[in-house]
């Protein structure tokens, strides 16, 4: 856990004193990623660097796991905090192995131990130790170098990591890949991470908490979803961008807006049964048909069920697409637009039907959070609550 | 096609050079050059010894002084003072070496000691300047990474700053030693001996062979020393930062 209390940093400049960080207090629980976000010159990097005392605070206190860091020896303190910088900062005169082992060496580990550790870490980021251990940084690509930068910080297994725009200098495609890798690693490592970024999309993707800074002050400190749903003021609002409702799509899983109503028919059911079920659940258009493993394979339309006799297996239409319950709404919405549909069956990892996601369900989820803060309602409330229907197809005919 | 042609040309060139050297050797021995030089063998050996001692003593003292001075000047606490001092040293390096020796003699008399002092001062400047520049040009983000990782200032200097500045520092030493070897013959003028004795006496007596007996070993010594420093920089500088190994 990292806690900042009334942290202040005043720089003495030729033009007088400049307050870079002004009474910042925040707390990052153990195992969470907190992203410090803001325009350049807002004090986020200064705040980060005060934590490992690369910059010493003017006043205020920093606690790591309850311990006041001002009472610790700064060199000792830094060796127990992982540090990743934007320029990566690999030492070009050292091999990859030496770069990774540097903190364990400073801490006095046994050579055997830190050599094994270097191999283990390279394996973790999918770089082959036999090829990379004895290379020099300049022989690596930017993305590879940044992976080394991250595992160097992890080498001595510090509980806290500080990352200063670690993925800022990497091209967008590689950045996505490294971010995903990093999130995967973090799932098992559970480090407490403070991370500086100016990229709102990166922050939404990676953070458990986002701290928005402006002119040295902490403006808002919230979970990404909360932040996007309820920006505290105009500055935060404009910083998040005018598509903040769409940005939230990434944060929500299909599961969260899924209507858990796996009512369906099978091949062997008659169309009459289908019609009964459609009417019993008030569906307007159709019902999903599943196979014996309860995997959705198609749908039977109401029209057909009304006018024809026979089995569902003979009169169904194929499904265009399904989504996994763990997919985010961004992907779900994209699927909907791609296939020109307003509902999508939702399945688990084995492809079994769990429920369905509807366009109105997504809209309702996004707008219901806005309702809590009446000043930022985007959709008129009459359009969100009352007309909404929990089951598929019902209001899609108009 | 082009490749084969080039290789063929290279072979021809090598052969031609060998022929020329051989021819030169024949001519030189025919006109009695070598036998005349061998007359001075004893002098050459004795004076070369003196010459080498002068170079090594003044060179090592200069390196031993200049690197620490450069390191101290490059420390952040001294940055403000460092610039004027470097300017002063730069002006110092424009003083001709002969004038330096003359100055040393006027304060310390004649003999080896004023020569070593003069040579030291002449070689001090390039090493100090290059050490300072090399260290200040180590990128800030490397120093920040080293600090953030938990290195003490001394560890940072030894593990990060010096290895990354080494190429520039060794280039300074190379320049300094070249100046040094070139100046040592002048040391004879203030009574410190060395191969300068053969050169200047040869000039005075109008004895070209005597002059050459001093000049050729002086030249050889300079070439050998330079090759040695080149070898040293190749082995000492990490393969990761040696600009000569940079792939393009």
Image (cartoon, coloured by chain):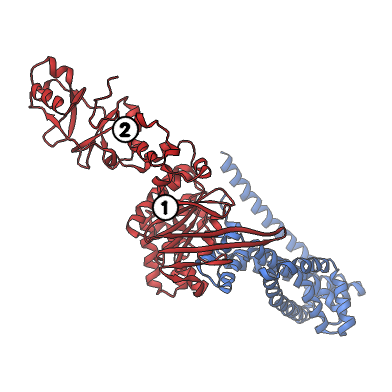
Mark linked to residue A385:
2
Name chain B's colour.
blue
- A372 to B156, vertically: above or below: above
Spatial CA span between label 2 and label 1 = 29 Å
Please, which residue is most extreme toward the top here? A307
- A114 to A149, vertically: above or below: below
x then y, percent, for residue A69: 48, 70
Pick whichever, A301 or A392, lies toward us. Answer: A392
Describe residue A169's horizontal placement relative to residue A322 as left or right.
Answer: right
x then y, percent, for residue B211: 84, 72
Discs 2, 1: same chain: yes
Q: Is residue A163 visible?
A: yes
Pick whichever, B208 or B149, lies toward us. Answer: B149
Q: Quadrant of residue B228?
A: bottom right
Q: Residue at x 7, y 23 (%)?
A: A270
Describe residue A139's horizontal placement relative to residue B123 as left or right.
Answer: left
Name the residue carrying label 1: A209
Q: Residues within 10 Å of mark 2 (few under 14, many from 20)?
A: few
x then y, percent, for residue B128: 72, 70
Name chain A's colour.
red
Pick whichever, A158 or A265, lies toward us. Answer: A265
Q: Chain of mark 2?
A: A
Indicate the quadrant containing the N terminus of chain B: top left, top right, bottom left or bottom right.
top right
| Element at label 2 | loop
Mark linked to residue A112:
none
x then y, percent, for residue B160: 57, 66
**How many numbered discs, if any?**
2
Ranked by sequence position, the earlier of labels 2 and 1 is 1
Q: Is residue A90 visible?
A: no
| Element at label 1 | strand
């Amino acid at each position: 856990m990292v806690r900042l209390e009334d942290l202040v940093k005043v720089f003495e400049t030729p033009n007088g004193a400049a307050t870079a960080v002004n009474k910042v207090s925040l707390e990052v629980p153990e195992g969470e990623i907190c992203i410090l976000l803001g325009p350049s010159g807002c004090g986020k990097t200064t705040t980060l660097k005060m934590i490992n005392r690369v910059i010493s605070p003017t006043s205020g206190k920093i606690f790591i796991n309850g311990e006041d860091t001002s009472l610790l020896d700064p060199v000792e303190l830094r060796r127990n905090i992982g540090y990743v910088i934007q320029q990566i900062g690999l030492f070009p005169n050292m091999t990859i192995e030496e770069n990774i082992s540097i903190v364990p060496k400073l801490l006095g580990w046994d050579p055997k131990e830190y050599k094994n550790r270097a191999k283990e870490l390279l394996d973790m980021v999918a770089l082959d130790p036999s090829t990379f251990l004895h290379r020099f940084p300049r022989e690596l690509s930017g993305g590879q170098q940044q992976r080394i930068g991250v595992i160097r910080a992890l080498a001595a297994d510090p509980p806290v990591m500080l990352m200063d725009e670690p993925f800022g200098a990497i091209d967008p495609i590689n950045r996505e890949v490294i971010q995903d890798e990093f999130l995967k690693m973090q799932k098992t490592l559970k480090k407490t991470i403070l991370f500086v970024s100016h990229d709102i999309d990166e922050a939404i993707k990676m953070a458990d908490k986002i701290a928005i800074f402006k002119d040295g002050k902490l403006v808002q400190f919230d979970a990404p979803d909360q932040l996007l749903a309820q920006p505290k003021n105009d500055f935060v609002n404009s910083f998040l961008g005018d598509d903040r409702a769409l940005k939230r799509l990434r944060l929500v899983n299909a599961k969260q807006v899924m209507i858990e109503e796996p009512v369906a028919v099978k091949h062997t059911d008659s169309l009459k049964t289908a019609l009964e079920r459609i009417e019993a659940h008030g569906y307007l258009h159709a019902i999903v048909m599943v196979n014996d493993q309860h995997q959705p394979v198609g749908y039977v339309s109401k029209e057909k069920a009304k006018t024809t006799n026979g089995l569902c297996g003979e009169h169904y239409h194929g499904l265009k697409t399904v989504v996994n319950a763990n997919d985010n709404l961004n992907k779900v919405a994209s699927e909907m637009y791609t296939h020109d549909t307003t509902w999508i069956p939702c399945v688990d990892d084995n492809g079994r039907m769990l429920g369905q996601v509807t366009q109105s369900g997504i809209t309702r989820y996004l707008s219901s959070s806005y309702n809590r803060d009446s000043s930022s309602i985007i959709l008129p409330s009459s359009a969100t609550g009352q007309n909404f229907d929990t089951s598929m197809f019902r209001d899609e005919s108009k | 096609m082009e490749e084969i042609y080039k290789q063929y040309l290279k072979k021809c060139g090598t052969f031609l050079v060998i022929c020329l050297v051989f021819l030169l050797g024949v001519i030189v021995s025919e006109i009695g050059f070598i036998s005349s030089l061998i007359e001075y063998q004893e002098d050459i050996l004795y004076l070369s010894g003196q010459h080498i001692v002068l170079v090594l003593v003044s060179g090592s003292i200069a390196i031993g002084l200049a690197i620490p001075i450069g390191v101290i000047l490059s420390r952040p606490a001294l940055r403000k003072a460092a610039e004027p001092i470097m300017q002063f040293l730069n002006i110092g390096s424009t003083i001709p070496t002969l004038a330096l020796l003359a100055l040393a003699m006027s304060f310390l008399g004649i003999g080896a000691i004023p020569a070593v002092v003069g040579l030291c001062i002449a070689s001090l400047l390039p090493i100090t300047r290059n050490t300072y520049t090399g260290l200040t040009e180590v990128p800030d983000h490397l120093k920040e990474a080293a600090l953030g990782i938990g290195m003490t200032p001394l560890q940072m200097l030894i593990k990060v700053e010096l290895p990354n500045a080494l190429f520039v520092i060794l280039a300074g030493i190379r320049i300094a030693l070249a100046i040094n070897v070139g100046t040592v013959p002048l040391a004879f003028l203030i009574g410190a001996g060395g191969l300068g004795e053969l050169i200047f006496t040869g000039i005075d007596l109008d004895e070209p062979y005597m002059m050459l007996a001093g000049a050729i070993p002086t030249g050889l010594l300079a070439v050998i020393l330079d090759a040695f420093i080149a070898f040293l920089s190749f082995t000492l500088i990490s393969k990761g930062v040696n600009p000569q190994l940079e792939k393009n």
